[in-house]
Image (cartoon, rainbow, N blue to C red):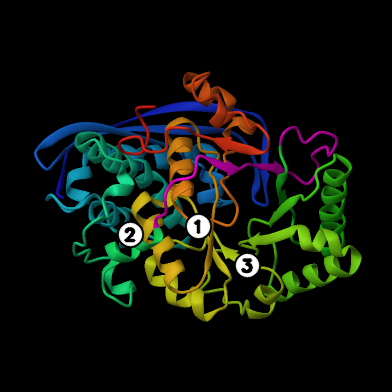
Amino acid sequence: MKTEVLEASVEFINRPFIKPLKLSSGPITEITEARVSVRARTDGKEATGRGSIFLSDLWAWPDPNLTHVVRDAAMRELSQTIAKNLRALCGDQAAHPLELGLRLHEAVAHQSDSNVATILARAVCASPFDAAIHDAAGIALGHSAFDFYERTEQMPIADQYFKSGRAMEAIRKTLQPPKKALDAWLIVGGDDSLDHFGEFRCFKLKIAGRDNPADVARTIAVYRAARAAKIDRPRISVDSNEGNPTADSVVDYLHRLREADREAFVAVEYLEQPTSRDIIKHRNDWHEASALKPIMLDEGLTSLELLSTVKRDGWGGLCLKTCKGHSFTLVAAAWARENGLIISMQDLTNPGFSAIHSFLVASRLNVINGVELNSPQFTPEANREWLPRLSSLFDVRNGVHRLENVNVPGLGSTL
């Protein structure tokens, strides 16, 4: 199949948070949603696809020397530049949507002036365009975007990362029949009340990473509060957002937790990106920590070239996020499967189109967690136009997000 980009546009919507989302780099209180439309021609048929993402500068570009206003403006400007030049950034010729998405990722995220501080922000800006290309192709053909891998085609950017030399074949083997229900996760901040967990039974615990006794105490408190709320088997993930200084500090946290409360230790299923996202400059040996619990690479996963380092340094798995690009996500998932690493599906407080997209990706992959969809917790207004028809997706019931129509054309913008 061949898809040709014809035109693209982007609009911005300011989204205030109903309560702050606190990261180690500071609290997020408002954010910009970038909504994208892409008109494309696939095998002679035209359609318009859509995508969206939050331009989460505090997460993607946590530079203390720049204000949120400055970073947000820069990401908006980059998004507009991508819209104006999308065809050229995708190679200026028709290709498989996966190849177009990978070209876009390389062209935007890995420009000559890119660095570790900005590469993730660039990837975030490019990601809704990648999604919209796949959405448009699927709508044009009347097929799910996950049906694009039935036959093998050359993918020059990605083929080199697989033993067979065929990325599409590896992706085809990785994709599974879609699930309609996935476990939902509630973000629990360092000072959030533990009095009411609602319908949730899975908890993403934000810790500081700089005070292990305090982090251990908080982890135990969350576990015991969940048990007191009659949750038989609470599931916990731990995220310090790069707050830990070293791998040794993570090992110490895990040993302390196991000694203090073995049941709470067992309930912790994995840890996300405990140390710096620059995994080349700040190398850590994760073998000892990963023998205790899977240590998952998140912010540091920005390039396919880093995958060999991931395996060598003992990371236990990959945190996948659609904000890094649909094409990048599928290739990374296939590489993880081939190399024996686990994967989880994380969130960027995805609203609307991007929440549907993230759910559909998670439903097709062998993720260990389910799916994080945090926009109902922090920006519910961003999902209003999909309610009540998709209330089972955005309102957690019996601990899960549910989407009945998982075989929708494209990536679900028509729902």
Residue 193 drawn above or below residue 262: above
Q: Is residue 129 magenta?
A: no
Q: Secondary structure at mark 2?
A: helix
Q: Residue at x 27, y 39 (%)?
A: 143
Indicate the quadrant where residue 161 lies: bottom left
Tell me, yes or no, whether the two marked residues, 3 and 2, touch with CB atoms within 8 Å.
no
Res 276 visible: no
Residue identified by numbered label 1: 366
Q: Residue at x 72, y 52 (%)?
A: 235
Residue type (three-letter) at the residue carrying disc 1:
Asn
Residue 341 rendering spot, x and y as whole percentages: 52, 70
Residue 172 rendering spot, x and y as whole percentages: 33, 59
Q: Is residue 187 magenta?
A: yes
Residue type (three-letter) at the residue carrying disc 2:
Arg
Residue 285 drawn above or below residue 112: below
Residue 336 rendering spot, x and y as whole percentages: 46, 67
Q: Point out the frontmost of discs 1 and 3.
A: 1
Q: Secondary structure at mark 1?
A: loop
Res 315 visible: yes
Q: Residues within 10 Å of mark 1 (few under 14, many from 20)?
A: some
Say which quadrant the C terminus sits in: top left
Residue type (three-letter) at the residue carrying disc 3:
Ile
Q: Which mark is residue 295?
A: 3
